[in-house]
């Protein structure tokens, strides 16, 4: 596993990925002998990584690096060759507002390759034939390593750390392969990166592909102990894997749009925010026309995405129909409710979370909107201890509360609202500029309407 310092201090992450072909012949089914052959094969791969045949190509550039040959250029020299998406579209955006915040993490992607041409005289091929029973193992190892660099580092220094990281990862892959080997069947090792609380930073862990998280609890317990992490919150489930800022999400949903916003300033105030990652779900997504009735469904979907992306559950975010069926299954609604356009509220959201995810929730009752201003302490405590999105319903509207800015001394409060009533495209600039995700004052609520708040509780598990 590879440990890097926390990302806020990172000038550049060098990430090298690429396939390494793993091939070996097992002439015996004796377990110790097979393990020796597999270990020798991994040792051969480690030798290749350390040899002059190892090649790194910088993605989106013509730069090719032989990491085990003499190179001394500064890391920043590599950047001049890299054509980023931002550079490509700079001219197109000249008349547009720039993003409110750019990522603090710069990632340079490199491709791992091996030279296959031989230098010097080439030997004539020799063919031999033997008759025996044997097993031939062949798979591809998906190498994926990261190292942190600063602009003062030379490329030689960075390459030495990359080669060391690749070598260490092959050692971890060997351990996982031997540990999970069954007969002559091996599982492909799978490297994943996890961002731990500061100052631990970015950590790479190798898991056996195809083995579900439910069967890796022992490994997670060992990792929690090794990194001195609490044992009531998952850090090493696959859903917790770090998402690099230069990689788009395949499902098309925006993640954490609130992160580009500037926090409000209150006298002696503090900001309390949702912990972790969620998806923004709103009207008219998923080819579903729920404009005018589906706001609470969308708020519930955002909450479900939080539990999924923190690794607490593996179930996908439920559809409107699945939400309705869950309410029928618990006896809250009649069967005719499925497929209808009927609203739901905080109590139904609580029931669905329990039915589909096994998540319990607290309900906060507010007799009128004017009283929400006095709930600062309770809301702040929720985001400190649970950190989950809150669904709030009142009248015919539902919203998601992602945080509060609250002053204990003055009582001033602002609410970070994610509005499910948005009907447009996944345009972060529009969503934040137009206030669909933004900080709101106490006047945002209908002062005379009653409100129910559903506060999901975080399971205590790893």
Image (tube, grey):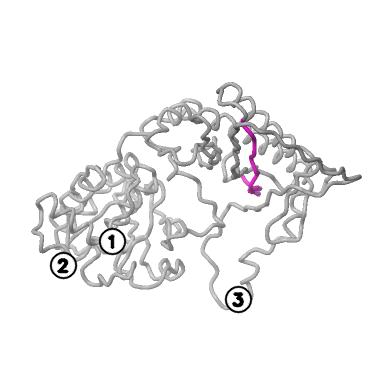
Reading the image, the residue beneath label 1 is 298
Reading the image, the residue beneath label 2 is 340
Which residue extends farthest right? 121
Q: Position of residue 133 (x, y in %)?
A: 60, 32
Judged left or right of residue 36, residue 408 is left
Residue 57 seen by the camera: yes
Q: Considering the numbered disc 2 on the image, is that residue within a helix, a strand or a loop?
A: loop
Residue at the spot 28% in from the left edge and 51% down from the top edge: 390
Residue at the spot 51% in from the left edge and 50% down from the top edge: 243
Label 3, label 1: how many angstroms apart (C-alpha)? Answer: 35 Å
Q: Are marks 1 and 2 in contact (CB under 8 Å)?
A: no
Judged left or right of residue 114, residue 124 is right
Label 2, label 3: how many angstroms apart (C-alpha)? Answer: 46 Å
User: Magenta: predominant secondary structure element?
Assistant: strand
Judged left or right of residue 391, residue 100 is right
Q: Nearer the viewer, mark 1 or mark 2?
A: 2
Magenta region includes residue 28 = no
Residue 322 appears in which quarter of the rendering? bottom left
Mark 3 is surrounded, within 10 Å at the Cα level, by few (under 14), some (14 to 19) or many (20 or more) other residues, namely few
Which portion, as a residue range, is magenta? Answer: 10-26
First in sequence: mark 3 vs mark 1: 3
Q: Which residue occupies the foreground of this view, 370 or 94? A: 94
Mark drawn on residue 94 = 3
Labels in figure, total: 3
Q: Position of residue 107 (x, y in %)?
A: 62, 52
């Amino acid at each position: 596993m590879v440990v890097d310092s926390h990302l806020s201090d990172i000038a550049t992450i060098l990430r090298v990925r690429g396939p390494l072909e793993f091939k070996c012949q097992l002439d015996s089914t004796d377990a110790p002998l097979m393990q020796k052959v597999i270990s020798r094969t991994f040792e051969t791969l480690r030798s290749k990584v350390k040899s002059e045949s190892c090649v790194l190509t910088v993605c989106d550039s013509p730069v090719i690096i032989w990491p085990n040959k003499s190179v001394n250029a500064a890391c920043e020299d590599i950047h001049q060759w890299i054509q980023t998406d931002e550079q490509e579209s700079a001219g197109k955006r000249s008349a547009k507002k720039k993003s409110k915040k750019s990522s603090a993490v710069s990632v340079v992607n490199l491709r791992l390759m091996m030279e296959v041409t031989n230098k010097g005289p080439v030997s004539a091929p020799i063919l031999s034939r033997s008759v025996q029973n044997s097993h031939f193992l062949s798979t591809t190892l998906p190498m994926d390593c990261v190292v942190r660099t600063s602009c003062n580092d030379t490329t030689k220094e960075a390459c030495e750390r990359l080669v060391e990281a690749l070598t260490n990862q092959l050692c971890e892959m060997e351990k996982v392969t031997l540990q999970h080997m069954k007969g002559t069947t091996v599982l492909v090792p799978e490297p994943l990166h996890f961002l731990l609380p500061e100052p631990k930073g970015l950590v790479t862990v190798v898991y056996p592909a195809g083995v579900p998280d439910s069967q890796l609890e022992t490994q997670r317990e060992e990792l929690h102990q090794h990194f001195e992490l609490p044992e009531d919150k998952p850090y090493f489930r696959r859903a917790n894997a770090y998402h690099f800022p230069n990689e788009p999400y395949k499902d098309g949903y925006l993640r954490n749009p609130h992160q580009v916003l500037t926090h409000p300033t209150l006298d002696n105030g503090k900001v309390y925010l949702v912990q972790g990652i969620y998806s923004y779900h709103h009207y008219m997504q998923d080819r579903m026309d729920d404009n005018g009735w589906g706001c609470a469904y969308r708020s519930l979907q955002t909450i479900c995405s939080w539990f999924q992306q923190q690794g607490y559950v593996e179930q996908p975010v439920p559809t409107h129909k699945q939400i309705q069926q869950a309410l029928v299954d618990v006896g809250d609604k009649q069967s005719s409710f499925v497929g209808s356009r009927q609203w739901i509220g905080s109590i139904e959201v609580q029931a669905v979370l329990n039915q589909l995810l096994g998540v319990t929730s607290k309900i906060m009752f507010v007799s009128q909107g004017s009283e929400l201003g006095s709930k600062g302490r309770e809301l702040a405590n929720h985001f400190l201890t649970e950190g989950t999105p809150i669904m709030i319903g009142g009248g015919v509207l539902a919203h998601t509360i992602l945080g509060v800015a609250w002053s204990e001394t003055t009582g001033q409060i602002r609410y970070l609202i994610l509005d499910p009533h948005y009907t447009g495209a996944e345009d972060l600039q529009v969503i934040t500029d137009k206030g669909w995700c933004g900080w709101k004052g106490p006047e945002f609520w209908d002062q005379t309407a009653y409100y129910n708040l559903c506060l999901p509780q975080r399971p205590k598990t790893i």
